[in-house]
Amino acid sequence: MATIELSSVRHTYAPNPDGEAAYALKQIDHTFENGGAYALLGPSGCGKTTLLNIISGLVAPSEGQVLFDGDDVTQLSTAKRNIAQVFQFPVIYDTMTVRENLAFPLRNRRVKRRDARARVDEMLDVIGLGAKANRRARGLTADEKQKISLGRGLVRSDVNAILFDEPLTVIDPLMKWELRAQLKEMHRRFGYTMVYVTHDQTEALTFADQVVVMYEGEVVQVGTPEDLFERPKHTFVGYFIGSPGMNVLPVMVDGASVRLGEYTIDLPGSPKPYLARKLELGIRPEHVRLGAEGIPATVQRVEDAGRLKIVRMKAGGRDVVAVLHEGEEVPADPKITFDPGGINLYADSWRVDLAEPAP
Ligand code: ADP
Ligand code: MG
């Protein structure tokens, strides 16, 4: 296992890039610590696969370095980097049996027969294909083939890291939960460095200790699931994490309060003065209260979401969403307030630290 560092990595697929927009990765500086379980989370096209392929060596970055335990491996081949990678779709040998497929990465590394056998048996158990160990892969379902790919990714114990690129896409929903739980268990048991790419927040938040959120070729936040939820560093993280996402409302700052249209909202602290910049207040639907005091709102729609109610409103000319428990009453003409602890302020989309006193 190794610590993997990306230093000033930029990448473009264009031979003659004209400007920032041509870069799939704009600037990446990030360290994946040895033995960490990371999720790389972001919408389709934000550069996740590109980043993973740069780590494994399938793609050479246009600029910057990749370091394993401090050694520059930017020019090393995939094989020399000693990385296991599991792709979105199965990569297996159709004519080999399930067992032979799993044993292949070990045979390649000349692992002793007895050790290999024990390891393969263990993987057969993890992916639940023990009963089909001697069947050829060709006749198996897409689901089962992908499980073989996962097993092949996990079978070696001497890799620097295991990279997963949306590996459960073709797996049926019930099995997804089980396999994800098993990956987490494998991580606990063997302490692999794991990087798991997904566009699904639930998958990222349940798998990883640290979630790396990407947006348009950049890392916008690295944190625990709780950090991402409570203190989104960028308005994109606020929208993207949580369901429904954070309310983001354009405001004007006035000392230790902000103005939303004609209404004043007190901030939990004073920001530095921000001049002529885009300022927004971020508040999670869970922190919006409906009552008799505050900003008048009109309820537009109430959605039933199991044990919660999603209340969609207009307030101060803006869309505001609140989440209530199923038993809570929705007043006909509510007034809304925000929990002070749930208020975030954003300047040009980046979170402002409200703890710092005004200079
Ligand atoms: P993700 O995995 O997050 O969906 P990708 O890393 O696949 O994102 O893609 C990032 C950007 O790079 C996208 O705009 C995509 O169209 C572009 N891209 C990816 N692979 C190639 C390629 N081989 N050639 C040209 N452009 C590519
Ligand atoms: Mg991808």
Image (tube, grey):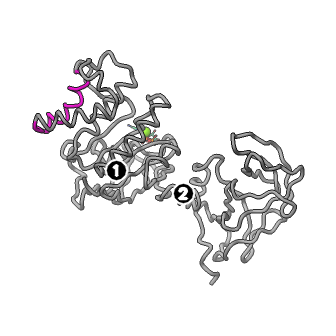
Q: Is 111 a magenta residue? A: yes
Q: Which residues are magenta?
A: 97-112
Q: Residue at x 42, y 41 (%)?
A: 181
Q: Is 235 a magenta residue? A: no
Secondary structure of the residue carrying numbered label 1: helix
The image quadrant of residue 148 is top left
Within 8 Å of ligand 1, the CB of disc 2?
A: no
Q: Position of residue 62 (x, y in %)?
A: 33, 50
Q: Residue at x 86, y 50 (%)?
A: 298
Q: Nearer the viewer, residue 185 or 107?
A: 185
Q: How far separated are the C-alphas under marks 2 and 1?
A: 23 Å
Query: Amino acid under label 2?
Result: Leu
The image quadrant of residue 273 is bottom right
Kindly identify which numbered label has been placed on residue 228.
Answer: 2
Q: Nearer the viewer, residue 62 or 228?
A: 228
Query: Amino acid under label 1?
Result: Arg
Q: Residue at x 22, y 47 (%)?
A: 81
Kindly identify which numbered label has been placed on residue 188.
Answer: 1
The picture quadrant for ligand 1 comes to top left
Q: Position of residue 230 (x, y in %)?
A: 59, 60
Q: State the quadrant of the C terminus.
A: bottom right
Q: Residue furthest bottom?
A: 359
Q: Position of residue 154 (x, y in %)?
A: 28, 40
Q: Position of residue 311 (x, y in %)?
A: 77, 47
Q: Nearer the viewer, residue 188 or 162?
A: 188
Q: Residue furthest top?
A: 139
Kindly identify which numbered label has been placed on residue 146.
Answer: none
